Amino acid sequence: MEAMEKIYSAFRVPTMEHIITDIITIPQDTLEVFDIAADSTIPGLSKAAFIASMIMSHCAEWTPSSRIYSIHSLPCQPSGTLLCQLKIPSIFKDRAIAETDGRVPRWVSSVCPAGTLTDIHVDYHGSAQLMVNVACDKLWLLWPPTESNLLWWNSRHTRASNGDTVCDAIAQLEGLELLHAKGSQSFVLPPYHFHAVLTFEASAHLGVTLWGFPWWDTSRRGVEWEIKWASNHSKNGFSSEMAEGVLNAIQDESLKYWAEVINRFPEHELVDTVQSWLISMKANIQDALAAIHASVETGKRKRSGRTESSKKMRHND
């Protein structure tokens, strides 16, 4: 846990009022929300409908027709949460960088009604996250990215849950830790840590991604696992498009920010190690992408050949 006075500025402590202001003032007319019951993303929900669902979820008994919505990533707005001018604790400033939106850290919030179960998942591609409670009563279930846990995740990575995944994870994954987030708390979620979240009361927390040497080894191992996962996408039951998307995201996200880290801290003892690793990972990603493209083209030729053969057989008949 981080001391909150290191994060709060001398101005304001974020509240649900700031979060609601973020929702109202976000430039888009509608919101992309997650339908908890349907386990799917819903684009184009009105802001009023989301706020109404938050209010009703507190007192309503759930039925199969109930609609419980959450927002997973709400950008903070100048007239809302950004007024609070949250700070990155100084303990990280000589070892890590935060994702920025221009010149300020890119804080986003997660907003969930009472009764929400956010299924087990992994965020991003190698970053840690600084999480800050706004109004919270949540239970976090956390699992480390051990070799055994990553092997279990191979067939589930990026895939929507079937509704039983959290129960399976509790029974089968190792290293479960529980965190009851309530009141003024903050914590750092390390890279590639699996997590599920049970929300007891309407809650919101803020988060910003961090890249830096405190999480280097965990980030490195996770990125290498993802590249291997994408290279074996067929074996793991995923499409070439899904695998290509993950590889491109690693290039655009993880490798980009690790390059920024070593440029920001050129005197750090791990700079040469990270630089060599970046060169190796870029080559591995290009090899994996080339193999995926070659496999796709081979599949197209085979399908085309079967189509032509079928046409000839029908013609001969």
Image (spheres, rainbow, N blue to C red):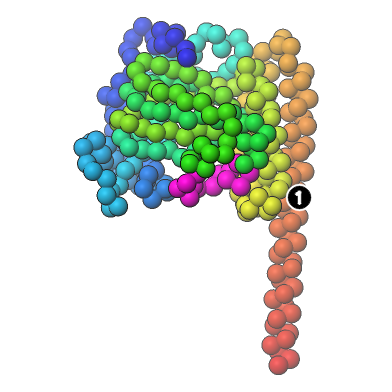
Q: Residue 54, located in which quarter of the rendered image? A: top left
Residue 202: x and y, percent?
30, 31
**Bounds of the magenta segment:** 153-165
Residue nearest the viewer, comparing 4 with 147: 147
Residue nearest the viewer, comparing 243 with 232: 232
Please tell me which residue is depicted at 60% across the width and 41% down the height of the picture: 153
Residue 40, above or below 127: below
Q: Residue 199, located in which quarter of the rendered image? A: top left
Is 80 covered by the magenta stretch?
Answer: no
- Left or right relative to 19: residue 88: right
Residue 259: x and y, percent?
68, 24
SS class, disc 1: helix
Q: Residue furthest bottom?
A: 317
Total of numbered circles in the picture?
1
Q: Which residue is mark 1?
A: 291
Residue nearest the viewer, comparing 111 with 79: 111
Residue 247 shows in this picture: no
Residue 146: x and y, percent?
64, 31
Residue 82 shows in this picture: yes
Q: What's the residue type where badge 1 is placed?
A: Ala
- Left or right relative to 175: residue 28: left
Residue 82, above or below 159: above
- Left or right relative to 175: residue 83: left
- Left or right relative to 165: residue 71: left
Please tell me which residue is depicted at 72% across the width and 53% down the height of the picture: 293
Residue nearest the viewer, comparing 128 with 65: 65
Residue 185: x and y, percent?
40, 16
Q: Main secondary structure of the magenta part?
A: loop
Please tell me which residue is depicted at 41% across the width and 7% down the height of the picture: 5
Please tell me which residue is depicted at 69% across the width and 88% down the height of the picture: 314
Which quarter of the image is occupied by the C terminus?
bottom right
- Label 1 neighbourhood size at 10 Å, few (<14), some (14-19), many (20+)? few
